[in-house]
Amino acid sequence: MKSAPLPVKAVIFDWAGTLIDFGSFAPMGVFVETFAELGVEVSIEEARAPMGLPKRAHIAKMLENERIGRAWEGLHGAIDETSIDRIYSVFLPKNEMVAARYATMVPGALATLDWLKANNIAVATTTGYTRSVMNHVLPEVEKQGFIPDVVVCSDELIEGRPGPLGIYKSMVELGVYPPAAIIKVDDTEAGLAEGVSAGCITVGVTLSGNHAGKTAMEIASMTPDGINQIRADAGEKLSKAGADHLIDTVADLPQLIARLAKSG
């Protein structure tokens, strides 16, 4: 497990389930609706499984699910690149509209971003969303007080997550290095793998993300034992994916960085 060097130079955040969209709901309903429109029923759980990947790769991974793949082939024939393109062409315009409706910042995110700025720690973002989706999200985020300096989108890279190129592009745009002085914060395996493959310190968020799959109000209404179970289940998955550290939400990041600085 990597500790933070002194000082941490930058934090690179994911978007849905990390900075915005508590519970990571925006893509899920769109995947379900898109497949249904093409005659294949999928569950929210099946849609969530590949979260964090670029969205075209996410669709390809869903089709690798034995049940979904069999249903698709029964209706449309063999799965190939044309199949993925067909699904993606239906999915993308729907996602552009829905993502903006789920662009509310996670509670405490703005305070964390202010703290990072006050401590001269640069901020960038990477995402499985395309630029066309983020063009709908960013105006909503700006209304809430956040204008990111760097936004790297999945369709701007030759290879997206779980590879490191989004991190590298962020480093170049920020002018910050080495990767070991950078923290990557994410709620998905693919997003954490992006940080691991680049050599960053990785932090998984357990309660606001894809694995919890609940709104902030739903979490707040749960018993401590229920919250602890979600935290443990999500934490186990994120740790297996390479998370060096775990936090509930990005609101907890300043305390983690301060703690790592003391231990370092």
Image: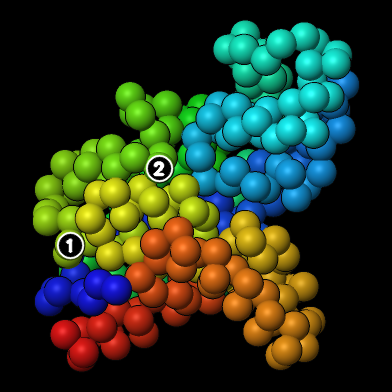
Q: How is the image coloured?
A: rainbow
Choose the circle earlier in sequence order: 2 or 1: 2
Residue at the image position 87 percent from the left and 21 percent from the top? 39
- Residue at position x 58%, y 12% from top? 81
Residue 22 coordinates in the image, percent (x, y): 63, 62
Pinpoint residue 28: horizontal percent, then vertical percent.
71, 44
| Amino acid found under the numbered disc labelled 1 | Ala
In this picture, is 30 found above or below 140? above
**Image position of 143 (left or right of 231):** left
Q: At which x and y percent is residue 30?
A: 73, 36
**Quadrant of the frame with the N terminus:** bottom left
Towards the viewer: 38 or 103:
38
Q: Residue at image x 59%, y 68%?
A: 234
Q: On the image, numbered disc 2 is attached to which residue?
A: 162
In percent of width and height, residue 197 lies at: 29, 49
At horizontal 22% and vertical 42% (from top left) the residue drawn is 168
Q: Which amino acid, mark 2?
A: Pro
Where on the picture, by quarter, is residue 224? bottom right
- Residue that carries the numbered disc 1 in the rendered image: 180
